[in-house]
Each structure stands twice: as C-alpha cells, then as structure tokens.
Amino acid sequence: MAYEKLVPEPTADTKPFWDALHEGKFRLQRCADCKKIRHYPRPVCDACYSMNAEWVEASGRGTVHSWTITHHAFHPGFKGDLPFTLLTVDLEEGVRMQAQARGIDEAELKLGLPVKVGFERVKDDLTLPVFRKG
C-alpha cells in the first residue's frame, strides 16, 4: 500500500537532518562560527548571522515542554492515526523540536517527562523522528 501522508521535502539546508534520521542517527545543525545549536535547520545563524553551518551528533534526549492530542485529521492520510499525540520537547542541546509520541499513554503525559528521539521508517527513502519515553 502506498504511503498517503504528507511528507517533508528536504532542501539543501534540511537534507543532512533527514539523511541522518534515515541512517538511525540524530544530528542537529550548529553555527560553525559561534557554535550555537539551531533547530529547525536554516541557512543563517540567528545569533551571529553567519552563513557557515556544520552538523553535530545530538543526544536525542529531552523533556516534554507541551503536547497536543489531535482528534481531527488535517489531511486524509492521517485519519487512521487518530487520535495521535504531538509533543514539543526541550532537547538537552537547548532547542525545541516537535514530533509524534510513540508508546506514551495519555495518562503518562506530564511536563518534564523524559523522552528520547526514535526513528520510524515510513518509506524506503524516508525516516521520521518520533519521541518515546526515555
């Protein structure tokens, strides 16, 4: 069966992030000049305005900052997943990231819950990040 959900379209700035996920690795973009970690990947550092970036291995660990439980599909491809939980996580590296929760019961959700990035291969050429208890 074909994968019918919306998928990210990597750009020159985001491709290293998606490639790393597909390899089972979690990498974040860092300014090559001032060393500030940034996420989402982008061409210009918001701290020093440098255009120089590098990619670094990241722990993938963080804590829940907030969450939402989705009961209405914004795209027909997601109807079968309802309800699903989208987490906003404060990563150890000092940035926030959003991804769906996996293996976390609604009753377990709380601010500060420790989580870790997991990898979910959804197509031959696409792996998405998810968050699991950790």
Image (tube, helix red, strand yellow):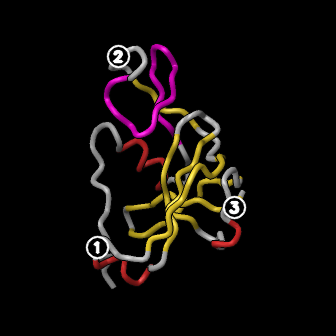
Residue 29 on image: x %, y % = 46, 33
Cα separation, mark 3 vs mark 2, equals: 36 Å
**For residue 107, side relative to residue 26 (left or right):** right
Whether residue 115 is in magenta: the answer is no
Label 3: how many residues lie within 10 Å, few (<14), some (14-19) or many (20+)?
Answer: many
**Residue found 64% across the figure and 62% down from its top:** 132
Label 1: how many residues lie within 10 Å, few (<14), some (14-19) or many (20+)?
Answer: few
Q: According to the image, label 2 marks what residue?
A: 49
Q: Amino acid at mark 1?
A: His
Q: Is residue 3 above or below residue 89?
A: below
**Residue found 44% across the figure and 71% down from its top:** 70
**Dominant SS type (magenta):** loop
| Residue nearer the viewer, 105 or 8 | 105
Name the mark on residue 75. Answer: 1
Q: According to the image, label 3 marks what residue?
A: 133
Where are the magenta residues, as a range?
Answer: 27-45
Residue 19 on image: x %, y % = 42, 49
